[in-house]
Image (tube, grey):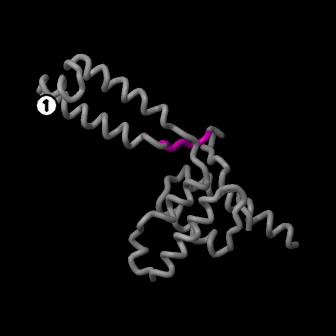
Amino acid sequence: MKFDVDVVLNKINGEPLKEKGDGYLRLLEAVAELSKDIHSGNSVLLEKKWGLNEKGAKEMLIEHIKEAKEFDVDLTLKNTCISVLEASLEKDKNLSADKKFGLHKMAEKIYEGGEVELTAEEVTTLKSRIGTCCSISVLGASFKILEQVKKKEEESEE
C-alpha cells in the first residue's frame, strides 16, 4: 500500500494538528533557567549571566514565553509514524533485536517522505503503536488516512 506520509493531520474541524518544531526545547530550557535565576532573587547573578536587572529579566521571560507559539508546525503522518516507531514502549521489552531493527528500518523508509510503500503488516504495526502512543485526535486523523488507502486498494482489487 502506498501512503503520502507528508500529508498534514487535521483536527475534526479541519484545522491542522500542531506540534512543536525545532528549537522549542532549547527555548524551554532558556525559559526554565531564566525563571530559576529570577526566583533566586540574586540580582548580581541576573546582571552577570543575562546582562539584565530583575525587571528586564521578567520582560525577557514573558517575551520568550510568547515566542513559544512561533514553534508550532503542522503535524504530518510522517512525524507521527517516526515518533511512534522510535518510542520505547513497555511491550517492546520482549521484542528481539531483529524486530526492533525492523521498526528502525521502517522509520528510515518513512523518513524519506513522499509516497511510501508499506505492507499490510507494517500498517498494522503503525496503527497499534499510534493507538498506544497518541492522543485520540492524532489517532483519528492517522487512522483515517491509513484506512482510506487500504479501502481504495481493496476496491481496486474487486
* Residue 83, position as x, y percentages in the image: 50, 58
Q: State how many labels appear.
A: 1
Q: Quadrant of the C terminus?
A: bottom right
* Residue 96, position as x, y percentages in the image: 45, 82
Q: Dot 1, how many residues are within 10 Å of its Cα: few (below 14), some (14-19), or many (20+)?
A: few
Q: Quadrant of the N terminus?
A: bottom right
- Judged left or right of residue 145, residue 58 is left
Whether residue 42 is situated above or below residue 5 in the rendered picture:
above
Amino acid on which disc 1 is placed: Ser
- Judged left or right of residue 5, residue 23 is left
* Residue 142, position as x, y percentages in the image: 62, 56
The magenta segment is 16-21
Disc 1, SS:
helix
Q: Is residue 34 magenta?
A: no
Whether residue 7 is situated above or below residue 66 in the rendered picture:
below
* Residue 153, position as x, y percentages in the image: 80, 67
Pick the residue in front: 91 or 69.
69
Whether residue 98 is situated above or below residue 20 in the rendered picture:
below
> Residue at (60%, 43%) from the top-left corner?
11
> Residue at (13%, 23%) from the top-left corner?
43
Residue for badge 1: 40
> Residue at (48%, 36%) from the top-left corner?
71
When asked about the image quadrant of residue 93, the answer is: bottom left
Pick the residue in front: 28 or 136.
28
When asked about the image quadrant of residue 144, the answer is: bottom right
> Residue at (56%, 65%) from the top-left corner?
107
- Judged left or right of residue 42, residue 100 is right
